[in-house]
Amino acid sequence: MPVLTRLIPSPLVVDIRAGALDDLAGVLADQRISSSGKLAIAISGGSGALLRERLAPALPGASWYEVGGGTLDDAIKLADRMKSGHYDAVVGLGGGKIIDCAKFAAARIGLPLVAVATNLSHDGLCSPVATLDNDAGRGSYGVPNPIAVVIDLDVIREAPVRFVRSGIGDALSNISAVADWELSNRETGEQIDGLAAAMARQAGEAVLRHPGGVGDDSFLQVLAEGLVLTGISMSVAGTPARPPVPATRSTTPSTSSSPSAPPATASSAVWPPPSRCVCAGRTRSRSTWPRCCTGTGCPCCPRRSASPWTSSSRSWSSLRRRAPAATRSSSTSTSHPTRSGTHTPTMPKQSVKPSVAELRPVVHPAGVKDRRSGEHWAGRLYMREISLRCDRHLVNTRVTPNQLTYLMTVFGALAAPALLVPGIAGAVLGVLMVQLYLLLDCVDGEIARWKQQFSLSGVYLDRVGAYLCDAAVLVGFGLRAADLWGSGRIDWLWAFLGTLAALGAILIKAETDLVGVARHQGGLPPVKEAAAEPRSSGVALARRAAAALKFHRLVLGVEASLLILVVAIVDQVRGDLFFTRLGVAVLAGIALLQTLLHLVSILASSRLK
């Protein structure tokens, strides 16, 4: 007899509204959820404690368990603590980590789960997957869907707005994910589950086309409903060949994967890599995307990177493997621009290295070489082409952009001791250290674009590395002029002048960076290029003259290292340190003069107005 219907795991209760938390006791009193009122409630240590004070009087039969974090060990410990309580159900009260730990613990001891979300950062609220950190990185474990979902919009509004924007990215990614699934159907014949595709597409479209913003209850309700529907669609997309993992009391979680599925990687798969921000309006719907961004706040990464909204374009062939039996390697939420090393989707680990032609449009998006103050001439001239060749060997490894930035900083700092080596050899070593610094400065951003791994800590480390490299070269130049290894007396005057030049180079960069700090603290938007132009004609003329002569660039690490090599060759011919010491004095004067002129230029422009 043919099967005419199918059973779809879905919650018994979905309560999404303002004030829903006040009626949580009534939801939990449902005989299908708890007949005795004995409940195990998992909470976080911070906001969870406040919610406990609010809810505990209405839940006298509940036991409260504080969850330390979102690791597999935390979830196993939570299950072991709950095992002896003889509860009717488990309640996960908190954000994504708390709910995922509660999901795993409930599945481990064979109890239903009630998900009470306090933010809308991702689509795992109602999904059959628990994403937990483990010793190998991050893994996804098949679990039953929650039996009930409660979302209080009043609580959602109290959470940082970045969580809502992250959830928006997850919901919108359904649109491109369904398109990816359809592409796979055309190219490989992969079967499409029409119901799962319809649910996911409608969830994304509802969020995309809603006229409200992150502060509107109506928009938050549509977003919450869309995330719940997305989680249910993950269950619908599962196939009979990969049934859900049954609840078990075994000591290890039961997970399986399709033989055709690729090995689990450290994060969600995104292929092909995005090359532009959807917020630019270059999509099929040219007016809807910008309107959505305007209404909800575009969560784009800093200017040097692509948008994480495009990075959450998940493969729907992998979405089917995200059914309970499959192991999903990381959270499906989009990356958080303000959080380091978190839910940042990365490129899948490929066995074949991408070609330079495949890398170029992704890691060198339009305008990256034309940035007025963000691209070094050496990068445009030769280093970007060299870095592309290095990228090919790194994109399929576990190397992260931040690790490359740390290494970049090390090479920049090594320029100082390298310059202490006497003669031309030391100057060559110094140039080599600075060139390696510049190479890694290009590579770290390119790997970040390819893997879609963005973080504020990466931007911060990049700036620290730039400060340190420039200072190290100038300090090393001064110590070199002091003739530390010579037979005569050490002349510390030159070491002082080199340090003075380094201080000036740092102050010049700091003056520029502090403009952004001042505007941020004053509640102003980032400065525009036009505002950087001085309003005084005299200052503007001086600035144009300096830009034409390029003398101000001599205090930067790359230019200074090349100057050091030139004077080292001349001094080698002469047999003394005359030109080295002359160079130190000149750079110290340039640094001090430029520090003063740059400060005047900033004050004379409209950047602080």
Image: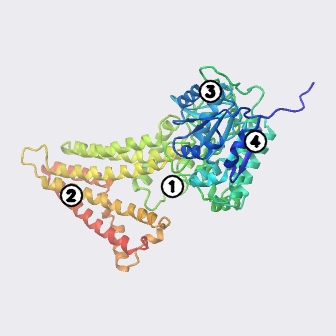
**Residue 244 versus residue 563: which sits nearer the camera?**
244
Q: Earlier in the sequence, mark 1 or mark 4?
A: 4
Q: Earlier in the sequence, mark 3 or mark 2?
A: 3
- What is the distance, in whole Å, between disc 4 and disc 2 at their CAs? 76 Å
Numbered tag placed on residue 202 in the rendering: none
Q: What residue type is disc 4 on?
A: Val
The part of the image, by quadrant, that contains residue 66 is top right
Seen at 51% across and 36% down, the residue is 68
- What is the distance, in whole Å, between disc 3 and disc 1 at their CAs? 49 Å
Seen at 55% across and 56% down, the residue is 366
Locate the N terminus and report the quarter of the image it occupies: top right
- Do callouts 2 and 1 mark residues in contact (Cβ within 8 Å)? no
To which residue does mark 1 refer? 302
Q: What residue type is disc 1 on?
A: Pro
Residue 596's place in the image compared with 59, above or below, is: below
- What is the distance, in whole Å, between disc 1 and disc 4 at their CAs? 40 Å
Q: Residue 504's x, y, as percent?
A: 27, 60
